[in-house]
Amino acid sequence: MSNRLELELDEVYKDVSTRLAALDTLKAAFQAFPDLQSNTDRWGTVRYCSVTVNIAVTDVEISFSCGCCEDAGLVCRPYILMHGMKIFSSPVEFLVGEKSLESGVIEYEGWREKLKLANINAVVVNKIIKYFMENPSVEGVQPCPLLDCDSDLGHTR
């Protein structure tokens, strides 16, 4: 066999092995969380989520909903790791604030209550509080400018 063909076969084998491992992890997640669903955001990112996992989430992704907007919403995505795969809460995202035009991040009123109503673990709530403490804004806590902060997780204005 030529060297080039051997390299191609190795690449195919590695790809198939990786996909089979991901499939096994997904099967295990579905067995652990029968209500597991997939959620695809506007950028095509697929996240697996479950209401059952809400109380067990221990970590959180915190990021802005848009990289180009000066006042982009700050969303948090609580999750647990299962065999290296993130299993997110349901709902997947919570709008908790927005970029400050001055500096830091504006915290929205009522975000803690929304997470509490969704049974999100207090460990995650404390991590979000820490994030706000490390990124204070001069504006302080503000009401959410949207009628329903969970209905539009893209641009806030």
Image (spheres, helix red, strand yellow):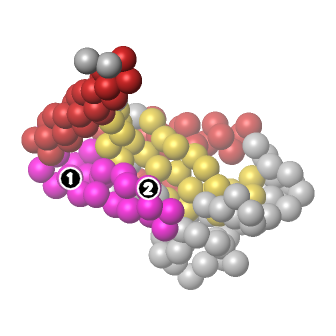
Q: Which of marks 2 and 1 is nearer the N terminus?
A: 1
Q: Number of marks in the image? A: 2
Whether residue 89 is visible, yes or no, is no
Name the quadrant containing residue 12.
top left
In the picture, the disc for residue 72 is: none
Residue extending furthest toward the front: 2
Give coordinates of residue 51: x percent, y percent.
26, 54
Q: Left or right: 48 with respect to 108?
A: left
Give coordinates of residue 31: x percent, y percent.
10, 41
Q: Left or right: 53 with respect to 77?
A: left
Task: Give the alpha-carbon distance from disc 2 to disc 1, as whole Å.
Answer: 16 Å
Q: Does residue 46 show up magenta in the picture? A: yes
The residue tagged 1 is 36
Residue extending furthest toward the bottom: 147
> What's under tag 1, amino acid-wise?
Leu
Dot 2 surroundings within 10 Å: few (below 14), some, or many (20 or more)?
A: few
In magenta, the rendered stretch is 32-54
The label nearer to you, 2 versus 1, is 2
The residue tagged 2 is 45
Residue at x 70% of width, y 58% of height? 67
Residue at x 65% of width, y 62% of height? 66
Residue at x 75% of width, y 53% of height? 105
Q: Which of 34 and 23 is in front in this view?
A: 23
Q: Is disc 1 placed on a helix, strand or loop?
A: loop
Residue extending furthest toward the right: 102
Residue at x 61% of width, y 50% of height? 63
Q: Which of 32 and 1 is in front in this view?
A: 1
> What's under tag 2, amino acid-wise?
Thr
